[in-house]
Image: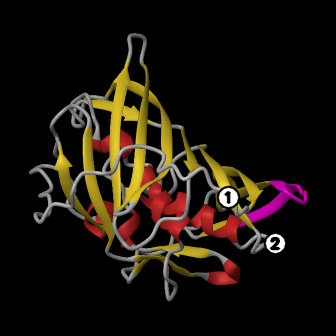
Amino acid sequence: MPPATVPRVSGEAFFVPGADGRWRPTSHVAGPWDPASQHAGPPAALLARELEHCEPREDMAIGRLTCEILGPVPVDAELEVAARVVRPGRSVELLEAELAAGERPTMRASAWRLLRSAASAGTAGGPPPPALPDTEATIPVGWNPGGYLAAVEWRFARGEWGVPGPAAVWTRLRVGIVAGEAPSPLQRVLAIADSGNGVSAELDMTRWWFINPELTLHVLRPSRGEWICLDAASSLQEGGLGAAFSVLSDEDGPVARGAQTLLVAPRPAG
């Protein structure tokens, strides 16, 4: 059964409560690839929220989270999200979550939840991020200036929109993940991590697809503050395969490492 179409709404978050525990997307979720489909960042953050609320334990934290993108997430349909503990344990647990539009699953996530420890090697996990610039980036002419791109503040420390090659950009969410609730550190990082392939594009976005069917995030520690730096580089190979790798940092240093498998192909004419 196809998802029921609902009118687009605006608001101060990517999602607002819908009927029967579902979530209703706002106008902020629309992605740059297709205005009828969500950017994967907001639904990935919604999945992370569901995982965090699944039989929560104060003594544990999510160390690795993988999102499988099964198909486009529509902007005009209410979404159902559910999570469960697949493998419980005293020190390590495996969780799963699914996001569906109507009866069609659109994204699935798995996460390893690990026991917190007082032990620390004292390493930062990588070099410090570049300094936070004073100037906000401008969306190039011809791109969709609304939706997700407008819901995030972008400040490039290296590279810029539409210029091929590695890039580092500081980001800050202008809206929440769900209405009336501040994003958790993990949700804030997940909302940005799926943009690694976009900021480090090696090809012209208007002529090529380089779409990721998955996103994997290894968490080093909880982020602090509103600003997240996404430092990313893409590698595209013959045969249409590619990958994007990123380091996500707050103003104190790295907080996570991300990876995306990429489908590389020419955009259809017209």
Quadrant occupied by the C terminus = top left
Residues shaded magenta:
81-93
- In the rendered image of this protein, does residue 58 appear above or below residue 48? below
Q: Position of residue 89 (x, y in %)?
A: 90, 57
Amino acid tagged 2: Glu
Query: Please, what is the dominant secondary structure of the magenta stretch?
Result: strand
Q: Is residue 110 above or below residue 227?
A: above
Residue 214 shown in magenta: no
- Point out which mark residue 55 bears: 2
Residue sitting at x 12%, y 66%: 134
Quarter occupied by residue 186: bottom right
Residue density around tag 2, few if under 14, some if 14–19, many if 20 or more, within 10 Å: few
Quarter assignment of residue 139: bottom left
Q: Which amino acid lies under the numbered mark 1 shown in the image of this protein? A: Ile
| Residue at the image point whose x is 43% and y is 36% from the top | 245
Q: Which residue is mark 1?
A: 62
Q: Is residue 114 visible?
A: yes
